[in-house]
Amino acid sequence: MIAGTSVLERTLRAFNSHHSVASIVVAAGQQDIERVLQIASAFARVVAVVPGGDTRYDSVRNGLNALPADTEVVLVHDAARPLVNGALIDGVIATTLTHGAAVPGTPLSDTVKRASAQGIVRSTIPRNSMHNGEAITGLTAVQTPQGAKIEILRSAYAAFDASQTRIEAIATDEASLIEANGGTVAITPGDTNNIKITRSEDIALAERLLAPRETRTGFGYDVHAFASQESGRTLYLGGVAIPHEVGLEGHSDADVVLHAICDALLGAASLGDIGILFPNTDSAFKDVSSLKLLSAVQSRLTEAGWSIVNIDATAVAEAPKLMPYRDAMLAAISGELGIEVSRVSVKATTSEGMGFVGRREGIACWAVALVQR
Ligand code: MG
């Protein structure tokens, strides 16, 4: 059971609800058949529950024989991978249609060794090797579902049925059979969440991966007056120096856009506000770039376990025109935060000549942020 639902039920749900899946066959050990039948009966696309065999090879062959005659592509999946998702299934089907057979794989960053039963290292699997004169780089961990056009998988099984090869020595997965039969197997991106429930701690891991993320929203507002002409201050907005006859007055660089964003982020995480964190009585923040403040705010959020979903800000200024600097602002903000540029939005409007903004006394900015953990 994972968060109150059986592993098999979760797995069947993923395939039963997928738009490309027509029929599902479950192979189950004799001792489990009753319970499996009971769970599978809730899923309309399950056309058969067949007895498993002594090996994976036997189980899959029994399943293949129970598929409807008009089946085009077969996906073989470990029921013990309940976190399989629709996008992964789509990827396997698309790659199978292109190449004939496909497996989802993720690059292995760990070094892989073989060890004896006593835990003594006997060899190291080389990361790079030559294969039929071709340089091979990269080890790939392969998951399921493994896909194949049905005639390709059937002929791989038939070839092994006819051979004297001990199947257990070769067929740890369906792709190995196809490879050994001279077929092409392509890799489609796997999903690191698509774990195989193997050890008891995997259940807790799966529950963590399934846990809904907590999201919070925050709001920020800031306003700065224009400095005197003689001050020589530069106008900074959204982390970008903008050519203008005058900059904004302030203790830091007076970047109202970044200040509003900082307050939105701090508000979302309930971490106070920019005035508490960076008091204007502290000389450390005198004329400091507000990008540094933004980065410090993000550090506070990270420490508290929050990451940024998105930020949206609206600056209100009569002049200068801000839109020509929008892309530079988005690049500066997303670059400082290390998040995709698509997670940041900065908009600009005027105050139609009304109020302090309309009288060109200053610039205001509103921002909202969404964070998650
Ligand atoms: Mg401010």
Image: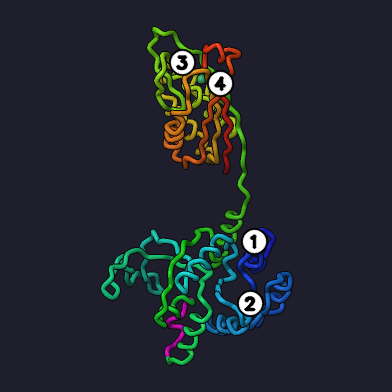
Q: Earlier in the sequence, mark 4 or mark 1?
A: 1
Amino acid on which disc 3 is placed: Leu
Residue 318 percent location from the top left of the image: 52, 18
**How far is disc 4 from disc 1 in space, using C-alphas?**
53 Å
Residue 327 percent location from the top left of the image: 44, 34
**Which element carries disc 4, helix, strand or loop?**
loop
When asked about the image quadrant of residue 222, the answer is: top right
Say if mark 4 contacts mark 1, CB within 8 Å. Answer: no
Give 324 or 153, whichever is nearer the viewer. Answer: 324
Say if mark 4 contacts mark 3, CB within 8 Å. Answer: no
Image quarter in which the C terminus is found: top right
Residue 350: mark: 4
Does 166 lie within the magenta span? yes
Q: Nearer the viewer, mark 2 or mark 1?
A: 2
Magenta region, residue range: 165-173
Residue 2: mark: 1
Which residue, given by chain and number where applicable, does mark 3 sit on? 248
Q: Nearer the viewer, mark 4 or mark 3?
A: 4
Does 174 lie within the magenta span? no
Q: Nearer the viewer, mark 4 or mark 1?
A: 4
Q: Nearer the viewer, mark 3 or mark 2?
A: 3
**How far is disc 4 from disc 3 in space, using C-alphas?**
17 Å
**How far is disc 3 from disc 2 in space, using C-alphas?**
69 Å
Q: Earlier in the sequence, mark 3 or mark 1?
A: 1
Q: Nearer the viewer, mark 3 or mark 1?
A: 3
